[in-house]
Amino acid sequence: MRRDKGSKERAMNRWLMSILMVCLALLLSGCGGGDADPAPAGEAGATAPAPAPLTIAVIPKGTTHVFWKAVERGAKRAGAEQGVEVLWKGPLKENDRAQQIQVVQQFIAQDVDGIVLAPLDLKALVAPVRSAAEHGIPVVIFDSALDGEPGEDFVSFVATNNRNGGRLAGEELARLMDGQGQTILLRYLVGSASTTNREAGFLEAIGAHEGIGVLVDNRYAGATAGEAKTQALNMIDQIRRADGIFCSNESATYGMLLALRQEALAGTIRFVGFDASPPLVTALRDGEIDALIVQDPQSMGFKAVEALVRHIGGETVEPIIDTGAVLVTGDNMDDPKIKRLLE
């Protein structure tokens, strides 16, 4: 990697220095002058300072969605198992690029040993990540892509294959519609690489069915469920004409659900969403949502932190790590392997 002399060796050298200091302290405590009295039996000897743990900053896109709380649990579990300190901090809302950039800059100023980042924008966060590398701080990108080459411009990209996830959604919606009818795509946010890829995969899958058309594919939900509900209500006439709907993230799916409920349309239009939260799982069980494409956010947080620690320790890390996604329906949602992803 281009920054091996800086980021990769810097934290490792700090770690080694701490261990050397411990060894020196132990050596000095056992090599006192010949006239010194030995410590009385049973009395504790000198205590050597423990090596300082690595400090890893994990920066999500936001901190309110259920998805990010699951990522946090996974990241902190990895920190506990790897013996590193995990600092969790991100913007409140998932459209606050300026605040996320500021958080990255704060952690660079704190001289953390590494950063795990889910970029809000695939372009806007390029400069902050480059700045981290220039300061010798390695970065793992997770959840959503950043412009650049994994393994070169940053350590690794840990995420769902979002394009495949979008295809899964499109194929399931086409099946539910028997290959006929009109669909609506409610997008998430401009610049969000993860959801853009899901939306592209969805349209690819739908486009393979000559009998299915797309009524709307140029509306964006916004960062919150409230904004998504408003956007859905603004196109309620098109929704009434639709046979199927796809929303590309948790908040967009929930906002659409709220709008459908308000207009007494929930359960009357085929509906596939992305990600899981307690309200969405309840709606799936009740038949208001037909299917959800569900990621493994705990695994994503865990593997991202684990990959960074391995890199700092001198191991080779895969440039792309796929954490997977599955189709969840009312028929399989109680399968133990699936149920774990819904909790």
Image (tube, rainbow, N blue to C red):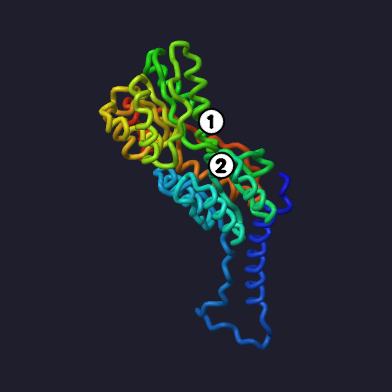
Position of the N terminus by quadrant: top right
**Residue at disc 1, secondary structure:** helix
Farthest bottom residue in view: 35
Q: Relative to residue 237, is residue 62 drawn left or right?
A: right
* 99 relative to 328, above or below: below
Residue 193 in the image: above or below residue 80 = above
Q: How crowded is mark 1: few (under 14 residues within 10 Å), some or many (20 or more)?
A: many
Q: Mark 1 points at which residue?
A: 197
Foreground residue, 53 or 258? 258
Kindly report the distance in space between the C-alpha atoms of the residues bearing marks 1 and 2. Answer: 13 Å
Q: Which of marks 1 and 2 is nearer the N terminus?
A: 2
Q: Where is residue 109 in the image (x, y as percent from the top left)?
A: 61, 61
In the orientation shown, which residue stands out farthest toward the top? 210
Crowd tier of the residue under label 2, counting other residues whose Cα lies within 10 Å: few below 14, some 14–19, many 20 or above: many
Residue drawn 37% across the image and 23% down it: 238
Q: Where is residue 317 in the image (x, y as percent from the top left)?
A: 63, 42
The amino acid type of the residue labelled 1 equals: Asn
User: Label 2 near label 1: C-beta < 8 Å?
Assistant: no
Nearer the observer: mark 1 or 2; the answer is 2
Q: Picture coordinates of residue 41 (x, y %)?
A: 52, 81
Q: Residue at x 48, y 28 (%)?
A: 218
On the image, the x and y values in percent for residue 119 come to 55, 44
Which residue matches tag 2?
121
Disc sitting over residue 118 in the figure: none
Viewer-side residue, 324 vs 191: 191
**Residue 205 at least partly seen:** yes
* Residue nearest the observer in this picture, 52 or 43: 52
Three-letter residue code for mark 2: Asp
Quadrant for the C terminus in the image: top left
Seen in the image, is 156 located left or right of residue 266?
right
User: Does the image show residue 8?
Assistant: no
